[in-house]
Image: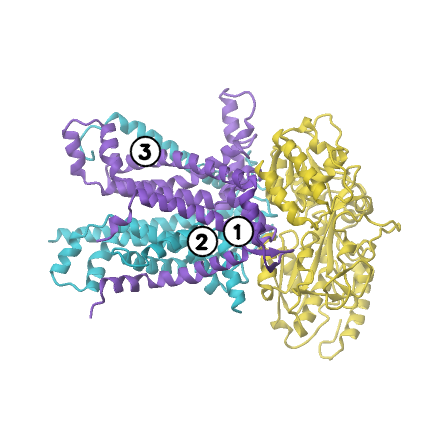
Chain colours: A yellow, B cyan, C purple
Amino acid sequence: MVNNNDKMTRRSLLKGAAAVTGAAAGSGVITGFPTIWAQNIKDIKITHIGQSYSTIKNIQEQANKDLGFTIEMQTVDLTTQMNRMLTQPKTIDLADVGNTSLRYFRGKNIVQPVTAKEYKWWDKTVPLFRDGTYPNGQKASLQGFAPIKSQYYTDAKGTDYSMTPTEWLVGVPLYYNADTLGVRPDLVGNVKIDSWARLLDPAFKGKVALQDGVNVGVPDAAMALEANGDVKYVDKGNMTKAEIDQTIAKLIEYKKAGQFRSFWTNFDQSVQLMASGEVVLQSMWSPAVTEVRTRGIACTFQALKEGHRGWYIMMLAMSHLEGLKRECAIEYMNWYNSGWAGAFISRQGFYNTIPENVKPFMTPNEYAYWYEGKPATENVLNPFGKVMEKTGAVRDGGALWDRMGNIGIWNTLMDEDRYLVRRWQDFIAA
Amino acid sequence: MRDTGQRRPRSFYFLLALFVVYMAFLYGPMLCVFILSFQGPTGGMSFPMVGVSLHWFEVLFGGAGGQGVGDMHNSFVRSMRMAAIVAALTMMIAVSAGMAYRRKFPGSDFVFYASIASIVMPGIFVGFGIALAFNLLGLEVQWFSSGIGAQLTWSLPFGLLIMFIILGRFNPSYEEAATDLGATSWQRFREVILPIILPGVIGIFMAGFTSSYEESARTSLNVGTGNTMPMEITGLLTSATSPVLFAVGTVTTLFSFALVIATLLITIGIAKRRQMRLSAH
Amino acid sequence: MTPSPRMASWLQVAPMALILFCLVLVPLALIITVSFMDYGFAEVIPELLWENYLDIFTSSLTLQLYAQTFKFVAIVWAVTFLLGFTIAYYLVFHVRSGAARAICFAACAIPFWTSGPIRMVSWVPLLGREGLVNKALLGMGLIAEPLSWLLYSEFSVVIVYINVLTLAMLGPIANSMSKIDHSLIHAARDQGATEWQIIRLVIFPLIKPGIAIGSIFIITAVMGDSFIVKQMSGGQINTAVGAITTELNAFQYPPAAAKSVVMLVIVIALVASILRLVDIRKELAK
């Protein structure tokens, strides 16, 4: 542990901390933090804003225990967060932003890059984010806003994205996951759910739901339409005007035929829809599936042959950060991916970008279940301690790279977003 | 028709039945929230009830492992503080403005329509407009400046409309009598008008309080750091899905209930005192 | 020195006017300016663009949106008026004790102190396929299969509007009713009028200001709402304000601004025409 009376340079602190952390990794104890020691860091407050699946009070508590300065998390809905970042950037220090929203901040000098050197876990980050490949060397799908499209800046000014690695990171990647359709296996009858096309199957008329909005709902719909042979796409994640027109026209047909029960706007709605049996098939998030299961209701996160819909979240540093505050912010970023927080969130079903760090903080059973797709050797608990899965169950879709290795489309913000939103209005009004 | 001792017409029973049905309709969602807040620990956000427990209240107050309860305590305090200030300001400003409208004056139409415009514009847009204005002026967005300002854009017009209603039923003869007796306009206001319209004024206070407490669209962009209650709840809805939300609903309802009872008692107290003063003549 | 009546009014209305100017009119001016601009990804490009308005006035979407909005306004207005009138009539003319009346009014208001979003959530366990209403209907043998149109439909939107807005009509009407001089009613009864005739010929004409105020509340509330529509329709119904919200959430401010301006003009026109029919201000000016 660092002697707090010594005045050390940042680099030597990092080196020392890394060594200590490495040694302690096996024991699952967090050491090596705080690595910055200064008289006045305890007066520093870092405001971290995000959605409720990443800014969780338990993580805040642990961070405040381990670090010498204060972390204040603020949980808001997506629109509020975006608005705050755009109109009141000085009121926040760090923000969790997903791939659908990153583009809004490009070239606006609202966020600043973090260098790969400052982020101590960069070399350990899964290759998907470092160069867009899987561990087996294959390139990940580029349909939609794939990680490699938004991980690097071309230069320190941060005005443009670079698809090849540079030293300026757009942000620290935190979580990612492969989403797919949630299913009520007990209510679908004998129909085998193996393709996105099932979403449009007349057998499920009035019993399917999609996430509302063009950034997730439309990619899901596109997967279904393509699988069903209704529309052909070049890049589902970046449609042309013609493709958009076809998509909307088809969707209106299905809507008028009564195919969709609802378009959910928040987590709670998606859980309610599934748990109550209002829908039997819908686009869903992993923690929602977990939550439905925790209530003792059968729900699977079904792997489909056309692949999953991928997404990721990055922590971005706001451009006004400088000096000691910036150092503390980076410190927090490093702490966040050092394992404790990552393990917590993994229990919701998300993957952390540094599985090595997460492993010591999970029980062998948990890690095997969530990351390796192995059958559970004992009950699996959700992050708050409730039983979510019984012994013997296997994670839907299997191991990390079975799922992440099969991405059909990434959540996206299309070039023709303007046109898409306009046409989406037509869809809702139909 | 309100004479006591007269037999009630048949219409009374029909109307009573309708009233009861309306009450049931009105209270349906609230009762659902209330009942479901006692949901058992393994239950979800809809029926059936999986046992009955105080579990979710414990989570709300004890923060047992913080099952996505968020920062309820602080946001509650923040909301209360803002609501009290907004209610007081609304009361004073709306009463003053309402009194102005007893006469015709140039610009009265303009202010009136500005008020209507304020209510009609979507909250998010008013909120955004104010945040933008503050930004362009280089001012920082704070709860006590832009936050309260944004909420006033909602509560003041309603306050004004309520004043129209109150003053519409105000009998001017008391006021004329006071003038005949030589009262100044301030005396007239304080001794005659205000006591009579006081229940309505308290109504404006309560309306301002509630509207501030519930408001989120205009406020969310203008409150600076720190959530208000509605923002906290909306934030939770996007992920938390436990009956804690219902527990929150129940607790806040009971709180509001207490407020209303208090208001009622105060109003009745004032009415009684006036009754006594009048009968003492 | 007592100020002239006009001066007095100006001074009294000054604080409100000032706040409205700074917090409503200035932002409105900004919004109008923005509505003529171009836009990129969450940024407004200060170049003149007519397209925002052009799109509004030439596309069928606008018609669809307003048709849907006015449909809701009409239905909600009609039902809240009937309900509000009837219940106000009951409370003012049939309930005999003042205390009971006050309690009834308070009772009408209490549900509104439960937070809006939370109440929205509770409609699902009531109206869903597995909800209480369906269970009751099935249990009573009135239907064979759960009704799915109870939720995520126009029906659920209207039901919630009525639930939330009846009070807004009830209040002003009750207030107008309580102003009515009882001697008028006694006189009518002495002349042999039936209850219905009294309602039609004495009460109704005298409460027009209350109806007008209530109508204003209802119209502005329904036309200005996007939350209830979205939640209760499951995102499947679009209205004028719904479209604005969708664009705001996509950070497309100029078209949202343009739509807001258009909507504002329409609502102001509606309110102005109501006020023309019934002069509320006559009640106040001396």
**Which secondary structure lies at badge 2?**
helix
Q: Amino acid at mark 1?
A: Ala
Which image quarter holds the N terminus of chain B?
top left
Q: Amino acid at mark 3?
A: Thr
Q: Amino acid at mark 2?
A: Tyr
Left or right, A12 with respect to B75, comes to right
Q: Which mark is residue C30?
A: none
Question: Reading the chain from its start, which is encountered first: label 3 or label 1?
Answer: 3
Report x, y in % for residue B271.
23, 50
Cα separation between marks 3 and 1: 40 Å
Query: Between A95 and A426, which is closer to the camera in this rendering?
Result: A426
- Per the image, the residue denoted by label 3 is C86
**Residue at image x 61%, y 41%?**
A264
- Per the image, the residue denoted by label 1 is C258
**Residue at image x 62%, y 71%?**
A44
Left or right, A307 with respect to A413, comes to right
Label 2: few (<14), some or many (≥20) within 10 Å?
many
Q: Residue A276's quadrant in the figure? A: top right
Label 1: few (<14), some or many (≥20) within 10 Å?
many
Q: Chain of mark 3?
A: C
Report x, y in % for residue A400.
80, 47
